[in-house]
Amino acid sequence: MRKSLIIVCGDSDRKYATYIQQLISAFDDEGDEIVGTRDGSVDAVVWDEKHYLDNMKKLNSSNHILFIGDTNAAKEARCNMDVRFDELGMSYGWLGTQAFMRVADNSLNKDNYEHFKELCAKYGKSFEKELDLHFSPEEASNVGKTAEEVKPIDFLPVPLGFLSPVLGVASAVAMHGKTVVGAAGQALNFGGDLLQAGKAKDQQYSLLSLIVYMDALPEFLGER
């Protein structure tokens, strides 16, 4: 009997919902080896949050639902769910017939990027371009300090000209929602990472989508 999966997401996360839907629809089993969900065993549909809320009263406890990201519906649904996987800011979990997957902001950095690449290799996930991450969590304490309070070693050797023609120090800091006083070097430090932040989260979500398909969905949907 084919099972149904409703994938609920916001507009910004639709590409990952579509990716999971494509993985489910692919005939990728190899003989007796099941890859991800069993071929032809699951029907997956993608709903935006409004469609989910409009149809919530029609759903029951037998409907399998996967929430992606940080929509209000996702936050409310996952508050009581068991976390089954949590690495490098990527997490998923479920309780009963409802599951979630999400990526935390600014969770990939130069200290854990090698681990991320190892996970990519493990799951056979590749990207056209590698990230160029400079920021390290140990440097976070420098935000908001003056130049005099920061040791010279805390600055990256990035010239002002690297960023200013594109964003400007003030713009870069505003993008990150931080305030740096009298420390242009710090702004550049974060600025280099800001240019990569969107790409990093996109790669994390792409990898997590594959991990969810391979490891989570078969158990969540009762195939294992």
Image: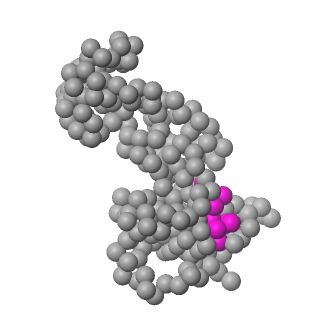
Look at the picture and state if 113 lies above or below 67. Answer: above
- Magenta span includes 70: no
Position of 209 with respect to 73 (left or right) is right
Image quarter hosting the N terminus? bottom right
State the residue at coordinates (37%, 33%): 193
State the residue at coordinates (66%, 62%): 36
Q: Based on the displayed image, in which of its 4 quarters is residue 138 positioned? A: top left
Look at the picture and state if 97 lies above or below 11. Answer: below
| Percent x, y of residue 188 | 29, 25
Residue 90: tell me if it is visible: yes
Q: Based on the displayed image, in which of its 4 quarters is residue 211 positioned? A: bottom right
Image quarter hosting the C terminus? bottom right
State the residue at coordinates (37%, 65%): 72
Look at the picture and state if 50 lies above or below 136. Answer: below
Look at the picture and state if 160 lies above or below 89. Answer: above
Position of 221 with respect to 134 (left or right) is right
Residue farthest toward the bottom in the current orientation of the protein: 58
Residue 167: tell me if it is visible: no
State the residue at coordinates (54%, 53%): 91
Query: In terms of secondary structure, what is the magenta stretch mainly?
Result: helix
Number of callouts: 0
Segment colored magenta: 211-221
Observer-nearest of 153 and 32: 153
Position of 81 with respect to 167 (left or right) is right
- Magenta span includes 215: yes
Specify the color scheme: one colour
| Percent x, y of residue 52 | 41, 77
Residue farthest toward the right in the current orientation of the protein: 32
| Percent x, y of residue 80 | 53, 65
Q: Based on the displayed image, in which of its 4 quarters is residue 27 positioned? A: bottom right
| Percent x, y of residue 33 | 77, 61
